[in-house]
Amino acid sequence: MNSLETSLRTRRDRGDKSFVPYLMAGMVPDWLDHIDALVAAGATAVEVGIPFSDPILDGVVIQRASLASLSAGNTPEGILAELGRRSVGVPLVVMTYFNIIHHLGLERSAHLLCAGGVSGVILPDLTLEEAGPWRNVAHGSGLDTVLLVAPSSPEPRIEKIAAHAEGFVYAASRMAVTGRADDDGHAAAVVERVRRYSDLPVFVGIGVSTPQQAREAYEFADGAIVGSALVERVLGGMTPTQTEQFARDFVL
Amino acid sequence: MNSLETSLRTRRDRGDKSFVPYLMAGMVPDWLDHIDALVAAGATAVEVGIPFSDPILDGVVIQRASLASLSAGNTPEGILAELGRRSVGVPLVVMTYFNIIHHLGLERSAHLLCAGGVSGVILPDLTLEEAGPWRNVAHGSGLDTVLLVAPSSPEPRIEKIAAHAEGFVYAASRMAVTGRADDDGHAAAVVERVRRYSDLPVFVGIGVSTPQQAREAYEFADGAIVGSALVERVLGGMTPTQTEQFARDFVL
Amino acid sequence: MTQTVRVMKDPGDDGRFGEFGGRFVPEALIPACEELDVAFRDAWADPIFREEFHHVLREFGGRPTPVTYLARLSEQIGVHVYAKREDLAHTGSHKINNVVGQTLLTRRMGKTRVIAETGAGQHGVATATAAARLGLECTVYMGELDTQRQSLNVFRMELLGARVVPVTSGSRTLKDAVNEAMREWVTCVDDTHYCLGSVMGPHPFPWMVREFQSIIGHEAAQQLHDRGVGTPDFVVACVGGGSNAAGIFAGFADSSARLVGVEAAGGAAIAGGQPGVLHGMRSMLLQSESGQIEEAESISAGLDYPGIGPEHAHLASIGRATYVGVGDEPVLEALQLLSRLEGLIPALESAHAVAWITREAGRDIPLGSTVLLNLSGRGDKDVAQVREILRGRE
Amino acid sequence: MTQTVRVMKDPGDDGRFGEFGGRFVPEALIPACEELDVAFRDAWADPIFREEFHHVLREFGGRPTPVTYLARLSEQIGVHVYAKREDLAHTGSHKINNVVGQTLLTRRMGKTRVIAETGAGQHGVATATAAARLGLECTVYMGELDTQRQSLNVFRMELLGARVVPVTSGSRTLKDAVNEAMREWVTCVDDTHYCLGSVMGPHPFPWMVREFQSIIGHEAAQQLHDRGVGTPDFVVACVGGGSNAAGIFAGFADSSARLVGVEAAGGAAIAGGQPGVLHGMRSMLLQSESGQIEEAESISAGLDYPGIGPEHAHLASIGRATYVGVGDEPVLEALQLLSRLEGLIPALESAHAVAWITREAGRDIPLGSTVLLNLSGRGDKDVAQVREILRGRE
Ligand SMILES: Cc1ncc(COP(=O)(O)O)c(C=O)c1O
Ligand SMILES: Cc1ncc(COP(=O)(O)O)c(C=O)c1O
């Protein structure tokens, strides 16, 4: 059991709900200050995006953030180095696409992630079947690889995913890419199904954009992941101070 | 033997060369005055075009003349009526395409042509094989149907054409539509071949555009037909007086 | 209607189809027409030539084209429609059948060059294509207006190595392109064949082109037979000059099938014309009161011809085939319908036949009938035009 | 080179071609990919499905397409070139083979809707066509830039009843259209099949599309055999995603023929790329130093893809096939040459294969060799572009 999972389990076992905000690294020059602000507001952990040119599980907002970060000349190495120089105080989970890791090389990626103070990774295009080689390397570095469960995942598959899950289980609330919050979603049902097979903390993501929605998630899940709603505001010029204020409402 | 042929033979037998100018009826408002001018200059006969929308044996000059005449609202009936009201003094030969005759009806055409003082017709798209019905009607009205011989006509065919020729034989000097005078042509050879089978007057046409060329034709043929060179000038604004002057040089 | 007269046979030496046909050309062209008649007669009777013709159409032209049952259209209109897919032939229409035949014949006659007329450019592109394959020189006459309206087809012909000559006389469209090609042919008959694009012109063209196109009808008859459909109740084709119609009718001339030719309402030589003589033939023609040839008007360039092949005039006069007209509006609708229901974007020309079928299903065409539609070409050439028209309405 | 490894077989449950392939998609899509795998495996083993697939391709798609001997080109370059004529297939390229297969499978899976990505519009038009025929709803994702550059194809798809969605993300071209189609697929996997356009994407797509396209190679092998040509020395095809190449290679995988894939020099995933993961597969990809996917650049929209199907990456790695690049200039020349000599205006994509053959005749291709060229599509879609380029030079 690695550092990310330990801390999240502890929190869960205390009955505390987790608020995990997402930011795209490099999307604005003061992105690290926003991360500090999120932590100050009470974030349990922070999900940090490393931009990829072809983010197939991301909606328009995070696509824009990727593009902004890439246009600013950010690279995975650069981002992780910057992260490593800042002491954030809560667990950091990197979210990116597998090609970034693949291109750097698995060992090198693991090394750079650790050096950046990262304790877990979410790779939305790397599902269980393909994750083996990476997970082996990640384990060696104490990195948790977070797996997703979708509303479309059938039970036998959930069971299998649960058996390999690390850190927490990312329960996608709806069949959609990030940023879609146009319906009620299936979060409760997905979480309930995950619980049958896993005692890991289960966080709801995709389409949680208001404090109200987060509170609803806290009813049945152990935490909520909030991405596009935050990213959109930061792209729109929200200051770190405002970010702290905004984030505070999501903390139970 | 009809009136056209009689007069042309007589002339030929006297050793006189025939100059047969061509004008498109209705191409200019005073077209009849130009005909008078041509007669005054010494034309043996006048070839009068009745315009047709699709003159496939005519080059650009006569095409333009057709269009001018049609645009002015001229019809075959109108043209023949106008001709009939003028007393020209030399034989008139109408040149048009068969659809004009076909559309008016064969009998009606023959009647209108006679009433217009016409004694012969040239229908360049009506060759011997297709000419039967028309020739029957024309004969009944004393109209000669002039047949053409081309450089491509083989001897057996010339023999056949000669056997049916009336008025005169139109010897096309070259494989071309009217108005082409860009090479020497084959006039002498064609005429020579026609002479083997016919004792009708033989006139050279297509590409005779200068007095010089007419004189060359007079060396071996009985006459020359001059169309585009004249039509171009009349379209260009030549007055009847100038027409008379221009035509005079073609008369031997 | 059961037919006993045997039709669509050899029109004989004078090229007559009843009162129509013949050879009305300048004397200078008579030997070339005669030579062509002899050469075609000889070639067409020669199994080696026939086999070469079929071989080239198979190997190069994409024949046989299939017959497609139009299931969704049939269900919607209540008659069974089978489409003969000339849209799948090389260059996108039936035109290739004719030009393959004529270019092979050109070579057989020892000529090294072809000329052709074209309206929208389909026949021009097809001729340039077949000429390129045999290494024949090729010049295409095209009305100046059409070269502007169809400039992409001009480029296509040039890519294929042909020279395109804009025709500035008359109305500067198809009719004038034919005139000009004939004028030019006079000057070069020795080494040049005039590759006419439809069942029109002086004998032997209407007959020869029909024979080359008859492969459509013979294939279709065999294909319908093979799949147990037998003789269709109707055989329907659009008619410009009439070559695709003649080609498919030829397979059913002696059958009980009703033959229907669909003209553009604005170019209906049978319904709106009178007998006349143009472009070397006696046929039905749109004419003014004083015998001048009138312009046809249609949304589809390929039906923009004021005449019709003489054999069609004959088939109409003896009642063996029926000729009907449809206007631009139903044609546009038919094009859209067939695209949406069947995944087939027809040429505007072919859409005329579709429009008539959809209009008459349950009326002139009894419900449950079997209809063979000649899909003479694909609509790719027309989509830009159709888009402009439909956009103009929004 | 004689080959003993048996290649181009079933890639197994994990969809691996050596080190390449696999299934790298969001968890939400895993069930749909698995369902598709099962459904395809089942259908492809079902003689009734196979017969239906072949029937539709025959009756509707225009198959078999012929093999044409290019006599004049062959003479000029000193090698015998045979062209497999996918340009004659319905909608103008080999794309129809794949979409007929996938739409039939869609219906078999009980789904009522397809989505597809498209670059220049060829695959989009083909998908819209096959969907129209079966009455499936169809939505096509197309980069916004491409919708502007190929607006006529947008209209064509709309005529065929499809909805076209301009993709405004990323570079607004093909790569982004794939991203967007995948994003959308997540939202509608229940009733919607994603009809991918080439041998790419997550398992089972690369395998399934290759199988549907393998009809090209099997037909060609039989046709060459029937005419006594036997196994060609070379089989040459252009490579974008690689579907036409995979299709024709499949007929010769176990033969002695040398297989050559021709990429656009500016989109040469094998020569210029590195292993990576994109669009659900591990393959060779054009990437920046930091692992971002780069834009391909080519005169031909259909080769403008930064990746290549994983099976090609595998065939390259084991040396069974060779992948070469040619630049825009020789491609333009090849297009003109084939048009002028053979009466075949090839698609710019296919002209890449022609360009390589003419370049290497007498060099990599020994004189007297026999070459099978996959003429994957017709150039009608490209003539406007080619004209602009050539005119710009005058
Ligand atoms: C597709 C198509 N169908 C029909 C026609 C009309 O010609 P025809 O009546 O000779 O078949 C054309 C002429 O261009 C055409 O392109
Ligand atoms: C004619 C043609 N050839 C080739 C291609 C490239 O695709 P693939 O490599 O999958 O055959 C395309 C793609 O649009 C095409 O239209």
Image (cartoon, coloured by chain):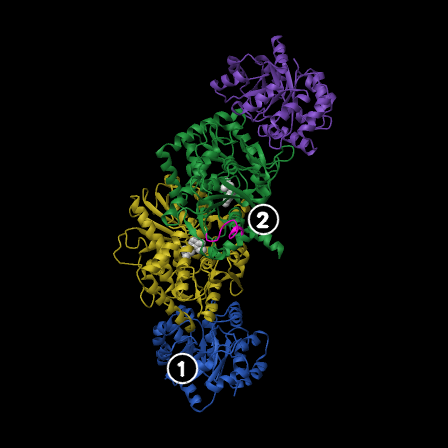
Chain colours: A purple, B blue, C yellow, D green
- Circle 1 packing at 10 Å, graded few (<14), some (14-19), many (20+), is many
Q: Which residues are magenta?
A: D359-368
Q: Which residue is mark 1?
A: B194
Q: Nearer the viewer, residue D157 or D66?
A: D66
User: Do marks 2 and 1 share a chain?
Assistant: no
Q: Nearer the viewer, residue C265 or D384?
A: D384
Q: Indicate the quadrant where residue C244 lies.
A: bottom left
Q: Is residue D347 rendered to the left or right of residue D170?
A: left
Q: Does the beta carbon at disc 1 come under 8 Å from ligand 1?
A: no
Per the image, label 1 sits on a secondary structure element best described as helix
Q: What is the total number of numbered labels drawn onto the structure image?
A: 2
Give the residue type that dot 1 points to: Val
Q: Is residue C39 rendered to the left or right of residue C117?
A: left
Per the image, label 2 sits on a secondary structure element best described as helix
Measure the alpha-carbon separation of dots 2 and 1: 63 Å
For residue B123, above or below residue D151: below
Residue A144 in sight: no
Give the residue type that dot 2 points to: Asp
